[in-house]
Image (tube, rainbow, N blue to C red):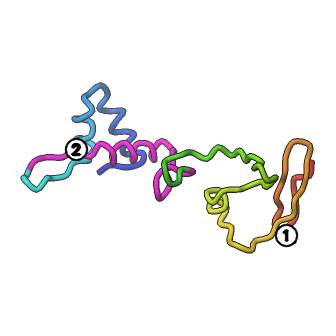
């Protein structure tokens, strides 16, 4: 199976061929139990994206958790006045229970700075 620049070169060299022939020529083929040929389109397209610099991450597309929803990077104040930051965001930053932050209020943003850390980007 070709990857990286070898894959990109092969795809460019083959030009206008069918998708099946393209996947087969790049080596994304496996053998089924009955001896038939199986074309691995998903693996091919994932390798093609990686070769073009689109990283899918270890567990799929980054920022998509359970349910397949994408992170919006928007927080909403709840009815009781709390501002909730979801688990997906804390996991993204590798935060643990008990981590403390200083709250910095700007004109258009709220910044959370790790307690004892420095705030390089003062507005």
Above or below residue 4? Residue 15 is above
Please give the name of the residue rendered at 37% of the width and 42% of the height, measured from the top-left corner: 45
Residue closer to the observer: 22 or 115:
115
- Residue 13 image position (x, y, % from top left): 32, 33
Please give the name of the residue rendered at 87% of the width and 71% of the height, measured from the top-left corner: 116
Residue closer to the observer: 85 or 47:
85
The residues bearing labels 1 and 2 have C-alpha atoms spaced at a distance of 52 Å
- Residue 59 image position (x, y, % from top left): 46, 57
Residue 37 colored magenta? yes
Q: Earlier in the sequence, mark 1 or mark 2?
A: 2
Residue 46 colored magenta? yes
Above or below residue 31? Residue 17 is above
Q: Quadrant of residue 21?
A: top left
- Count of numbered circles in the view: 2
Magenta segment range?
36-63
Please give the name of the residue rendered at 22% of the width and 44% of the height, measured from the top-left corner: 39
Residue contact between numbered discs 1 and 2, judged by CB atoms under 8 Å? no
Q: Is residue 41 left or right of residue 65?
A: left
Q: Secondary structure at mark 2?
A: strand
Badge 1: few (under 14), some or many (20 or more) residues near its Cα, within 10 Å?
few
Badge 2: few (under 14), some or many (20 or more) residues near its Cα, within 10 Å?
some
| Outermost residue toward the top in this view | 16
Q: Is residue 67 left or right of residue 80?
A: left
What residue is shown with label 1? 115
What residue is shown with label 2? 39
Residue closer to the observer: 67 or 32:
67
Please give the name of the residue rendered at 32% of the width and 28% of the height, measured from the top-left corner: 15
Residue closer to the observer: 54 or 82:
82
Q: Is residue 45 left or right of residue 65?
A: left
Q: Quadrant of residue 91?
A: bottom right
């Amino acid at each position: 199976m070709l990857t990286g620049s070898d894959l990109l070169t092969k795809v460019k060299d083959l030009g206008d061929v069918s998708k099946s022939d393209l996947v087969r020529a790049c080596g994304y083929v496996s053998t089924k139990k009955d001896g038939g040929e199986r074309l691995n389109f998903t693996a091919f397209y994932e390798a093609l994206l990686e070769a073009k610099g689109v990283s899918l991450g270890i567990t799929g597309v980054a920022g998509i958790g359970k349910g397949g929803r994408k992170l919006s990077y928007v927080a909403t104040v709840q009815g009781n006045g709390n501002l909730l930051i979801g688990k997906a965001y804390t996991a993204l930053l590798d935060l643990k229970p008990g981590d403390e932050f200083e709250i910095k209020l700007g004109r258009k943003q709220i910044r959370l700075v790790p307690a004892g850390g420095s705030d390089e980007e003062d507005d």
